[in-house]
Amino acid sequence: MSDRTPSEIAAIISALEATGNYAVFKRLHPNRIPLPEIPLSTIGADTFRGCYVDVEATGLDHDTDEVFEFAAIPFTATTDGYILSVEQPISWFNEPTKPIPDEVVELTGVTNEMVRGHRFDPALFETLLNGVELVIAHVSRFDRTFCEGLHPRFAEIAWACSQSQVPWRKHGHDSTKLSNLALAHGFVFGSHRAANDCAAGIAILSRELKGTGMPALAQLLATGLSDSFKLFAIGAPFDKKEMLKARQYDWSDGTRGIPKTWWKEIPAAEYPAELEFLQNHIFSRAHDVPAKRVTPKERFSRRA
């Protein structure tokens, strides 16, 4: 349909969707991210500069694996969650000290030939992060530690996660995978390339979170910019395991700086009620429950 005008294409799409038998998805391009119309109420609102980032690495181990592709899309948004504008995507390659594994090449489409001779420039990271108040990734627990290894400024800025800090399932989504969330919002994109992932992340955050009347970014800011507590149910009876799992506690095997126990991270406002639950329903008595306060500047890092 390359010879069709935009209005003709729109009419065809409307006709297909009107039958109830078809759904038409739009391909998302990193340098052309469609933003919803912004309410007039945002005029004069306070704004901030954010940056959505994504890295592709040779593996999952922050100690031994290396980043070979970094991408970012800076944006400006209101403090209540409306994305006003996005800047041009940034994408940089870096040649790792060891070849990119074949399975990673197959997954990302980035070959050793593509990254050969490339090196990350620390000065470019400094320029990119100038004025940035919030960094967002879709799995920040993965991306943040790698990014902090690229430049120390990443450790000084608040981070948020578009996967774990937006209640997607509560609002009608059956998956928090980035590609699935994009599909649910009518987009397809070339996943596992860093700039494409950044574009998809910004696109889904700019859309209304079902039932809230606000963009998903509003929920992310409410959760991501608040302190939280990590609670450690050390010594919890074995027969309480299912109860803890049902309440979304995770099991730690003693790595990543977390004791070998059931644990959960909750908003600071929920701390008193969660502590009462543990004492009354897990330990059945007053019990010392270790807790650690986590700020947005520490969250998702090894310091948290």
Image (cartoon, rainbow, N blue to C red):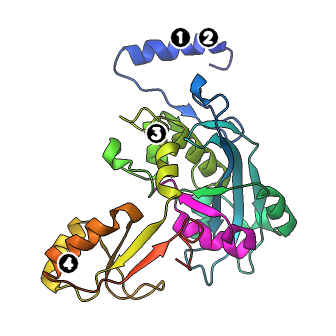
Pointer 1 local density, CA inside 10 Å: few below 14, some 14–19, many at least 20 = few
Asked if the residues shown at circle 1 and circle 2 are in contact, with their CB atoms under 8 angstroms apart, the answer is yes
Which residue corresponds to mark 3? 183
What residue do we see at 55% from left, 69% from top? 142
Nearer to us: label 4 or label 3? 4
Q: What's the residue type where badge 1 is placed?
A: Ala
4 or 3: tag closer to the N-terminus: 3
Where in the figure is residue 177, as x and y percent of width and height? 44, 53
Q: Secondary structure at mark 3?
A: helix
Which of the two discs, 1 and 4, labels the residue nearer the N terminus? 1
Q: Is residue 68 magenta?
A: no
At x 51%, y 13%, the residue is: 12
- Residue 18 appears in which quarter of the rendering? top left
Q: Residues within 10 Å of mark 2 (few under 14, many from 20)?
A: few
Q: Nearer the viewer, mark 4 or mark 2?
A: 4
Q: Is residue 155 magenta?
A: yes
Q: Which residue is mark 4?
A: 279
Q: Which percent across, then down, holds residue 41?
A: 58, 26
Report the side of 7 relative to 239 (left or right): right
* Contact, mark 3 vs mark 1 (Cβ under 8 Å): no
Give the Cα separation between the discs numbered 3 and 1: 21 Å
Q: Considering the numbered disc 1 on the image, is that residue within a helix, a strand or a loop?
A: helix
Q: Which residue is mark 2?
A: 7
Q: In the displayed structure, would residue 244 be above or below residue 29?
A: below
Residues tagged 4 and 3 counted as in contact (Cβ below 8 A): no
Residue labelled with disc 1 = 11
Q: Write down the region rendered in magenta.
A: 139-163
Of callouts 3 and 1, the N-terminal one:
1
Marks 4 and 3, how far apart in space? 42 Å
Q: Which secondary structure type mostly characterizes the magenta part of the structure?
A: helix
Secondary structure found at label 2: helix
Lower sequence index among marks 3 and 2: 2
